[in-house]
Image (cartoon, rainbow, N blue to C red):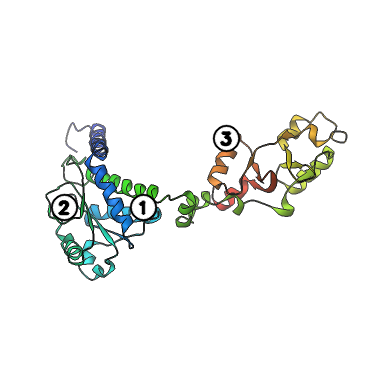
Amino acid sequence: MPPGTDLKAEILKAAHTSLNGIATTVDMLEGPLGDAILHAMELIASKRGRVIVTGVGKSGHIGAKAAASLASTGTPALFVHATEASHGDLGMITVDDCVLALSWSGETRELSDIVYHTRRMDIPLIAVTSRSGSTLANNATITLELPQVDEACPLKLAPTTSTLMQMLVCDTLAIGLLVRRGFTDRDFKHFHPGGTLGASLTLVRDAMHSGDRLPLVRSGTVLIDAISVITEKGFGLIVITDEENNIRGIITDGDLRRHAHVDAKLTVVDEVMTVGGQTIQPDMLLATALKTIQDRRIGALVVEEAGKPVGILHVLDMLRIGAA
């Protein structure tokens, strides 16, 4: 390290340089760049095939991420490495597809075969580059032109700011397409079934206890009998219903502690219960249910449909499937 070098100052300078690139790109999104992305969205939406994303080097890494983001948000996409395309993978690109090519300079030699293929087959080409007069831009159907700014690298060589800007534009394109097609959290679940994210996108009805597992007693039940049901079912609560099975209220372990002074043999549940109580819907996402549990600092929730109890969701069930 050169004498007198302030490393903290250097990393802060790099961060501010990258931030400037992001801010400049956001400013351009309010003008021509934003308009170009809208045109690209309409072009992609008009095609029956996939978005074929390509690039080389760091742009290739960003391209692979862009393809994954597009595919996971409802836009079929595939990353094809430009070098591999020249050795047979051009066959992956059909006339029903469109190509999204990333190159900061727009002069990446390895992209030439893909560019030629798109022109020969009349396949739409969307370019992401910082040079509107480059070979890539001149052959593109639509150009998403990025501002030319300094790299965060002190040598001004390593792709740093430029890759952040490429990722921003590709993410903006993916999210724009998501919104355009009305992609919902349930659609998202179909493409993310694994891990904590997939678990949190599971519906309450898929994790709740139902049927004979429900802790239920009728209004007017003596508290001592309700306590036996709470103990037997093991959820730390009980649901009080009327004769038509509509929810009247809920008693939790906390309610019992707060009413420890009453005679459980002489008190009926109606005198102790919380009227109505906190309930959730069976088609609610587990992520939303978890937030309710955390905000209210409770261990379980009653699941109701049309005012009737249909299930119990316990925080331990969410831990078991990885949603919490």
Total marks in image: 3
> Toward the viewer: 254 or 100?
100
- Looking at the image, do the residues carrying marks 1 and 3 touch, with CB atoms under 8 Å apart? no
> Toward the viewer: 289 or 38?
38
- Looking at the image, do the residues carrying marks 1 and 2 touch, with CB atoms under 8 Å apart? no
Q: Nearer the viewer, mark 2 or mark 3?
A: 2
Mark 2 neighbour density, 10 Å: few (under 14) some (14–19) many (20 or more): many
Q: CA distance from mark 2 to mark 3?
A: 51 Å
Residue 259 screen position, x and y as percent: 77, 30
* Kind of residue indicated by mark 2: Ala
Q: Is residue 270 visible?
A: yes
Q: Residue at x 24, y 68 (%)?
A: 90
Mark 3 neighbour density, 10 Å: few (under 14) some (14–19) many (20 or more): few
Task: Pick whichever of labels 2 and 3 is earlier in the sequence.
Answer: 2
Task: Pick whichever of labels 1 and 2 is earlier in the sequence.
Answer: 1
Q: CA distance from mark 1 to mark 3?
A: 31 Å
In terms of image quadrants, where is residue 252? Answer: top right
* Kind of residue indicated by mark 1: Ser
Residue 288 screen position, x and y as percent: 54, 43
- SS label for mark 1: helix
- SS label for mark 3: helix
Residue highlighted by disc 3:
295
Q: Is residue 324 visible?
A: no
Q: Residue at x 67, y 45 (%)?
A: 306
Residue highlighted by disc 1:
69
* Kind of residue indicated by mark 3: Asp
Residue furthest right in the image? 266
Q: CA distance from mark 1 to mark 2?
A: 23 Å
Q: Is residue 274 left or right of residue 43?
A: right
Q: Nearer the viewer, mark 1 or mark 2?
A: 2
Residue highlighted by disc 2:
137
Residue 96 position (above or below residue 73): below
